[in-house]
Image (cartoon, rainbow, N blue to C red):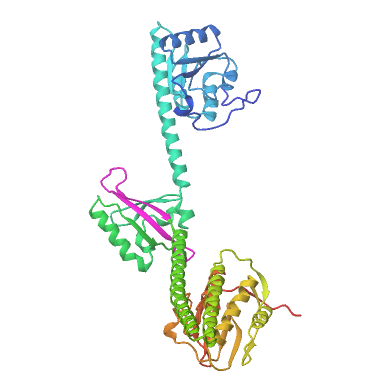
Amino acid sequence: MSNHFKPEQSHGIVTHPIATTDESRGSDQMSVLVVDDEPAAADLTATYLERESGDFEIIQKTTAEDGLKHIDGIDAIVSDYDMPKVDGLEFLQEVRTERPELPFILFTSRGNEEIASEAISEGVTDYLQKGGDSSTYSVLANRLKNAIDRYWAVQALYQSEQRFSRLVENSSDVITIISESAKFKYVSPSATKILGYEPSELIGDFIFDYAHPDDRQYAMEEFFKAVDNPDIEPTVRFRFKHPNGDWPVLESRGQSLLDDEVINGFVINSRDITEIKNREAELERQNEQLRNIKQTLSHDITNQLTVANGGLELYRETDDSDHLDRVDHSLSRIEELLEHVLEFSDQNITDIDSESVSLRNIVTDAWSVITVEDAEFRLNESKRIKADPSYLKQLFENLFKNAVEHNDQSVSISIGMLPDGFYVEDDGQGIDLEDADKIFESGFSTVHNKTGFGLAIVEQVVRSHDWEITVVEGSDGGTRFEITGVTLRPEVAG
């Protein structure tokens, strides 16, 4: 007996461990393929099965080759053993390569222990001999129904497991099961995408070893509080150490299932909310700017209106036009304030158009707007910078104006390169370093009658490029602004 046979034509069959599910059947009908080289025997088997149960839908074939063409989509096979060319066991072998779990009952008039043993080794579902009275067909029908029910149950379980696996794998959350001692017992596949670790890397590790030092104590207290009291379902936000060195912010919702025999752990759903936190911080920063603008306008414009109204009253009383100069000055000041507010509001940068620009050209253009005679600048070195040229020019203009306006005497400004950026330094009277954290706030100024928006715009330009800015004491006692995190390239000759 040959081990395998090759049908003369392709069957168009797709290999799969489980062909259908209870959801895809759409009814309780059980599709059964009956294969017997004796058409009368096949018809008799089909008749009895249909009489035993109206749930059976019978397909009859007289050769194994023809039967193999129809195994896709059926729920079970009943096959004779002794058939020409291809016998029942060879048929079983081929079916198992295509549908490993499909119920297969060998129903034969010729049987012995050797055949039964080989059938079992090949994975036959059941073995039944023909003969006797009609009760044999009742036994066959009963065994068929039981085999198909088990088959459907396995299919449903497999489908459920596959569905769960897909959901967990593609979830935007990381699902973990933590032991009572806070060690990873299970980590969903989504951890690779969200946390940067393969699940196997985390198993057995203490979860809070990955928490940021500043967040660790708080997160631990919330966790162990919930372990002690299963009614507590905490939601904790903490920074988690990514293998690339970043600290994404996780929001973790936990539930104690330590008493559950299957889970026996603390289930945590975690999602990355770093972007949400960044948006919250940006919104708070913008709100703070609006509060500063409101305070500045409320104070300065109210003062100027008071002066203007006073001057106008004096003019009406005295008819002295000198009082109108006070009115004119106040209105000019109000106009200046409004211009600065509009300028500042336009600098709420969301999109920048970066390109490689010459620092020398940008600095020269920016200096051209400075009209103070007793001010000078020196460019010590120039490189090309990846930046938005318009916003970069605005940055230098505001830094130059800040240096000129905050010094009563002549001032010299120098610009030079840093390993990852550049600096702007003046030799003026300097800045009180206690104000260093405030100078980039909108509306803050140490000079009377100045709006305090200039350096706030500088900070917006820096932030929009993902750079950093710091202010320190200059080498000659003045003020030095250092902008770092900049992409630099050598200056092109000529």
Above or below, 345 against 145 in this view is below
Q: Which residue is drawn at 56% across and 74% down?
A: 339
Q: Where is residue 54 in the image (x, y as percent from the top left)?
A: 43, 12
Q: Position of residue 302 (x, y in %)?
A: 44, 76
Magenta stretch, residue numbers: 243-271
Q: Between 200 and 251, which is closer to the camera in this rendering?
A: 251
Q: Is residue 7 magenta?
A: no
Q: Which residue is drawn at 66% across and 22% down?
A: 8
Of the 4 image quadrants, the one containing the C terminus is bottom right
Among all residues in the image, which is located at the extreme right?
494
Of the 4 image quadrants, the one containing the N terminus is top right
Q: Position of residue 93 (x, y in %)?
A: 53, 26
Above or below, 124 against 440 in this view is above
Residue 437 sits in quarter? bottom left
Residue 205 sits in quarter? bottom left
Above or below, 348 against 257 in this view is below
Q: Between 438 and 372, which is closer to the camera in this rendering?
A: 372
Left or right: where does residue 53 sit relative to residue 377? left
Q: Is residue 91 among what the camera can see? A: yes
Image label count: 0
Q: Where is residue 206 in the image (x, y as percent from the top left)?
A: 34, 60
Q: Is residue 256 magenta?
A: yes
Q: Between 13 and 27, which is closer to the camera in this rendering?
A: 27
